[in-house]
Structure formats: structure tokens, C-alpha cells
Image (cartoon, rainbow, N blue to C red):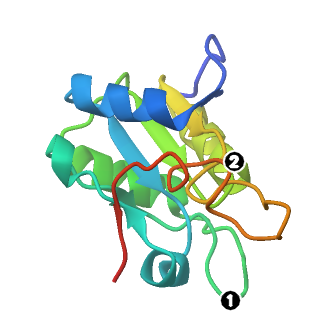
Amino acid sequence: MSAQTDDKPVDDVDVEMVWKTLQSRPGSQLVDVRTRAEWTYVGIPDLGPVGKRTVLVEWQTFPDQAVDPRFAERLAGELKALGVQSDDDLFFICRSGSRSLAAAKAMAAVGYRACHNVACGFEGPLDDGRHRGACAGWKAAGLPWQQS
């Protein structure tokens, strides 16, 4: 893969647009970059209704929070196995949008040309009661998700 020419920076996309694109564009993918602990205990987006599965690749490892130096390589392998092309839409999601933005930029840097950050992530920001999942993000929008 070649380095990106920065002709299209990573943008923030709201969850409703992500869901519509996942439904309408066969090559589009959702990449959840949270930790295994978050996937297990908080839940993951359920893409079964659109005939897909969420791609799960950690950006940082738990508990040390170090960025995985092989992230781009590992994710590229997962995407290749799914038949994803370098110009297919890739939507990156984390808890609230920070890690996913960094991950999207990393994949754009290795040649994926349509990387998007899911604004507000899976759980969104803290509400007035200091809880997540109620005021913005995937869960708050009522989009499908599952918990183990």
C-alpha cells in the first residue's frame, strides 16, 4: 500500500450516517478499536441486520494502554480477508471518538482512502450524571448492539 496523499482527511461522521452507509454500500466496514475488555463488558455494535460483522482490532492494549505497533498490519489483514478495497468506506469507532480518530488516521496513512471517525463513538460523552451511553453515540441512537 502506498502512503496517503492527504487529499481527503479523516472526517467525523454521525452514527446514523454510518448505519445508512453500512446498509447501502457492500464494501463499507465498521472497525471497533476498543479493548477486548470493552467489547466483552460494554458490548459491540451488532451488524447482523445488515449482513456484516464488526471488525474488532484493538488500537491500544489493556491494561497498559500502549498503542499496538502492528495495528495497521493486523487490520489490513482482516480487511483483505473480507475483500475490502482501499477505497471502501471504513468507519472507526471507540468509546467516545478519540482512539478511533487516531486509528483512522493510521490507516489513511497506509493507503486506505475513505477512513471516517464515528463521532461520539459507541458510548458517547459523559452525561450530567457522569454516565455514558445516554446522550450521544451508537447506544444512545438506539442502533443494534450486543453484549456477551
81 left or right of 65 in image: left
Asked if residue 110 is positioned above or below residue 80 in the image, the reply reads above
Q: Could you say which is closer to the camera, residue 48 or residue 142? A: 142
* Residue at image point 54% right, 50% down: 93
Mark 1 residue type:
Pro
Across and down, in percent, residue 4 comes to: 58, 23
Residue type at mark 2?
A: Ala
Residue 15 spot, x, y in % from top left: 51, 37
- Classify 139 as above or below 147: above
Determine the residue located farthest toward the bottom in the rendered image: 63
Report the side of 108 relative to 65 (left or right). left
The C terminus - image quarter? bottom left
Compare residues 116 and 140 and report the one nearer the observer: 140
Q: Give residue 20's quadrant in the image.
A: top left
- At which x and y percent is residue 45? 38, 58
Image coordinates for residue 76, horizontal then vertical, percent: 38, 49
In which quadrant will I find the N terminus?
top left
How crowded pointer 1 is (Cα within 10 Å; few <14, some 14-19, many 20+) is rated as: few
Label 2, residues with CA under 10 Å away: few <14, some 14-19, many ≥20: some
Question: In the image, what residue occupies the spot 79% across and 60% down?
Answer: 127
**Residue 145 versus residue 76: which sits nearer the camera?**
145
Answer yes or no: is residue 102 visible: yes
Residue 63 image label: 1
